[in-house]
Amino acid sequence: MLRASDLTRCRHRIHRAATLPRGVALPEESGSVAQRREAAADHREQVRARLSEDHRRHNPRETWAEDVHGEALAAADPAARPDRVWNARLPRELDTLRAGGVDLLIRDDDRGGYIPVIVVNHKVTDPGSGAATSPMGAWAPRADPHRKMRGQTRDQVRLAHVTRMLERLGLASPARMGGAIGYDADCIVAYDLGGPGGILEQYDARYADRQAVARGLVDTAPARVAECASCPFWHDLTGPDGRTVDGCGTVLRERHDVSLVATGHRGTMLRAAGIGTIDRLAAWQGRGPDEWHGGGFDDTVVSARAWLVDEPLVRRGPRVTVPRADVEVDVDMESYQEHGAYLWGTLVTDDGADLGYRPFVTWDPVPTDDEARSFAEFWTWLMRLRDGALAEGRTFAAYCYSQNAENKWLLGSATRFQGYPAIPSVDEVRGFIESDHWVDIFEYVGENFVSPRGRGLKVLARFAGFDWRDDDAGGEASMAWYREAVGFDGDAPALDQRTRVLEYNEDDVRATKALREWMSDEAADEVPSVDDLPVPGEAELRAIEAALG
């Protein structure tokens, strides 16, 4: 069966699922996937509770129903159908392969039928104008002067999928509209699904293709895309007879497939240019093919050459440079989804002396006003340290690894808590992050190295000899620890998990320090340069490609 989520997934994944031999068990979903699923379920439940309570208070004459089967809804007298249906369970369509359900159905009193509304755990609007939105308690879409729509293809596909299933039951509104309640849950974003070339027509073409794949009528081939990181078919599987079912990763490595170093649309462009193997890409000389767009072609060639000799890091030039200072502060922030930043971890180095780790934290579940207190304390401390160093004629630098997350919460906290004690202005924060005192080590890694295996801190800090104390350390895992640490699910706060979060955060700032110091002192001697990598010749290429078939 095909659910709406399948329509925005890799086509080959659908083929693998449809042709999986009997008895082959798929691995359990990763902790990060399970956590995202749980967070989405929590969000839906919060929205359900709010909507049902608001409906009871403000619309007592209208009816609210939950967990209704689509067949029962279709069989009911139209006049007796509920005005709102939460968690409508739609029947599987064995002939079309469609399966799915919908979070909320809102009765369209003007035209008959229902408007489908989905609840998603991501943002569906941004500040601006041009979106059509409706109040949460009613279906009354109108132009919104304060919001612009985010282009969420997966949401549009899901609404179209449900609409086709409602049409089959005779329950769809002829308005051909749908809605989405996003993370902020402050409105319903309205989508017009109909019209020539509109969402429904695009969905129909996409669905016909995926349906053909599922039925084995269309051939597909593996290629590495972002989805592979969480796909159960990437790794080898084992059947009940002990036989190995090769995963896509194994197949691609055996073929030296170019998508291993040029994922997604870049791999597609290279194939269009006749470059299907890593070897052929590694041998490329001169400017990139005409089909290549978006920059970075030279780095992709270097990555191919590095892959052939299993080199995980390559130096661009003879020297490695990264800013250093008399007083250095490594900073790492921890947030919980979009709720807030609950921890700012710091590590001070003064003229080479490690002065230790200091966290600024709130253990009140975010969002909370206590977040303003911990952020203000962190900011006041950091600015005093900076101003004190500069007043003494010494240099100062604060470091983070990939500033996008830290900048988001620096600016976001200053905006949200404006007027609270010791909270800086947005202009003050922006001035700091745009100054030379705020250094993103991620950017300097990119300026100095080509990293075929990615530029993640967990990957690169190990070149500096650093490792994390916790084998499960990672952003997704830390969110699970945080839930237990603050009793997010109603349990008593787990003090051991607070320690685990703090140790993870401390290891992150120490990893940043270790990496930048290694870059300053040893990297140029230890990491091979671009010029050190071998380039396959034409005769070697022909031999390799003959062996690969």
Image: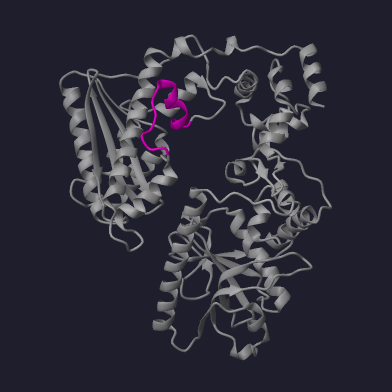
Left or right of 230: which side holds 198?
A: right
Q: Along the line of sight, which residue is nearer the eye, 264 or 287?
A: 264
Q: How is the image coloured?
A: one colour
Whether residue 128 can be seen here: no
Instruction: State the image quarter where residue 185 is shown.
Output: bottom left
**What's drawn in magenta, residue-wise?**
456-471
> How many circles with numbers are drawn on the protein?
0
Residue at point 68%, 51% (across, down) = 24
Left or right of 446: which side holds 415?
A: left
Left or right of 211: which side holds 302?
A: left
> Where 286 falls versus 421 (above or below)?
above
Q: Along the line of sight, which residue is nearer the eye, 129 or 83?
A: 83
Q: Along the line of sight, which residue is nearer the eye, 370 or 108?
A: 370
Whether residue 461 can be seen here: yes
Q: Along the line of sight, which residue is nearer the eye, 472 or 388?
A: 472
Left or right of 312: which side holds 431?
A: left
Residue 385: x percent and y percent?
19, 30
Residue 310: x percent and y percent?
60, 21
Residue at point 63%, 57% (across, down) = 5
Quadrant containing the N terminus is bottom right
Would you say residue 543 sits in the magenta stretch? no
For this orientation, the residue located farthest to the front is 241
Residue 305: x percent and y percent?
64, 18
> Where 93 falls versus 130 (above or below)?
below
Quadrant containing the C terminus is top right
Residue at point 16%, 23% (across, down) = 391
Residue 151: x percent and y percent?
57, 53
> Where 206 falls versus 78 (above or below)?
above
Would you say residue 460 sits in the magenta stretch? yes
